[in-house]
Image (spheres, rainbow, N blue to C red):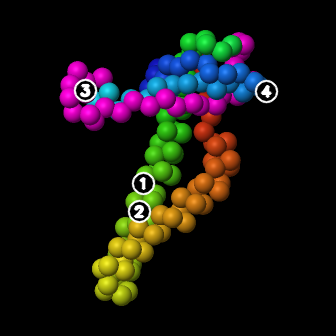
């Protein structure tokens, strides 16, 4: 199986290098980012993101301005989707159904089911350093 199928890859430029860390600026685009009509509809979304790479994992020394390809295991991408989107959706739906069945009040159920995302994302934010260790970006040589 090829490397491309197992990893998510993005071209990038090294933004800075310090203390065995490399910060790489990548440009992520929405699906319509390359559409020829993007200037007309305003839906195109292009954003610069900076990812951190541990320099000890690389064989070569890099400097600011170098063009590189940043890679992330596809399983890590799926884990990020699960934590960021799927699990909160499941929590909202379970809370919505449970509150409607317990109280019958749809307005209260809607409010509480949306409110459950506040402590969820607060917990995610509080545990960001622990979660960060499971998402390892690397520079493809």
Q: Which mark is residue 90?
A: 2
4 or 2: tag closer to the N-terminus:
4
| Up-down relation of residue 95 to residue 84 (above or below) | below
Question: Which residue in the protein does label 1 denote?
Answer: 86
Determine whether the residue tagged by mark 2 lies in a helix, strand or loop: helix
Question: Which residue in the protein does label 4 denote?
Answer: 19
Mark 1 surroundings: few (<14), some (14-19) or many (≥20) residues within 10 A: few
Determine whether the residue tagged by mark 1 lies in a helix, strand or loop: helix
Of the two numbered discs 4 and 2 in the rendering, the one whose residue sits closer to the viewer: 4
| Up-down relation of residue 51 to residue 101 (above or below) | above
Magenta-colored stretch includes residue 114: no
The Cα–Cα distance between marks 3 and 4, rounded to whole angstroms, is: 41 Å
Please give the name of the residue rendered at 21% of the width and 33% of the height, measured from the top-left corner.
41
3 or 1: tag closer to the N-terminus:
3
The Cα–Cα distance between marks 3 and 1, rounded to whole angstroms, is: 32 Å
3 or 4: tag closer to the N-terminus:
4
Residue 98 image offset from top left, x and y in percent: 39, 78
Residue 124 image offset from top left, x and y in percent: 58, 56
> Is residue 135 found left or right of 113 in the rendered image?
right
Residue 46 image offset from top left, x and y in percent: 39, 30
- In the image, the segment drawn in magenta is 34-62
């Amino acid at each position: 199986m090829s490397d491309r199928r197992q990893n998510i890859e993005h071209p990038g430029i090294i933004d800075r290098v310090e203390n065995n860390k490399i910060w790489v600026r990548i440009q992520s685009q929405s699906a319509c980012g390359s559409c020829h009509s993007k200037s007309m509809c305003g839906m195109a979304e292009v954003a610069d993101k900076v990812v951190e790479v541990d320099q000890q994992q690389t064989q070569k020394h890099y400097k600011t301005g170098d063009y590189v390809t940043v890679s992330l295991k596809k399983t890590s991408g799926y884990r990020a989707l699960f934590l960021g989107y799927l699990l909160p959706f499941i929590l909202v739906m379970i809370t919505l159904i449970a509150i409607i069945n317990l109280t019958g009040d749809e307005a209260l159920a809607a409010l509480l089911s949306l409110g459950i995302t506040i402590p969820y994302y607060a917990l995610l934010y509080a545990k960001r350093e622990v979660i960060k260790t499971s998402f390892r970006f690397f520079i493809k040589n």
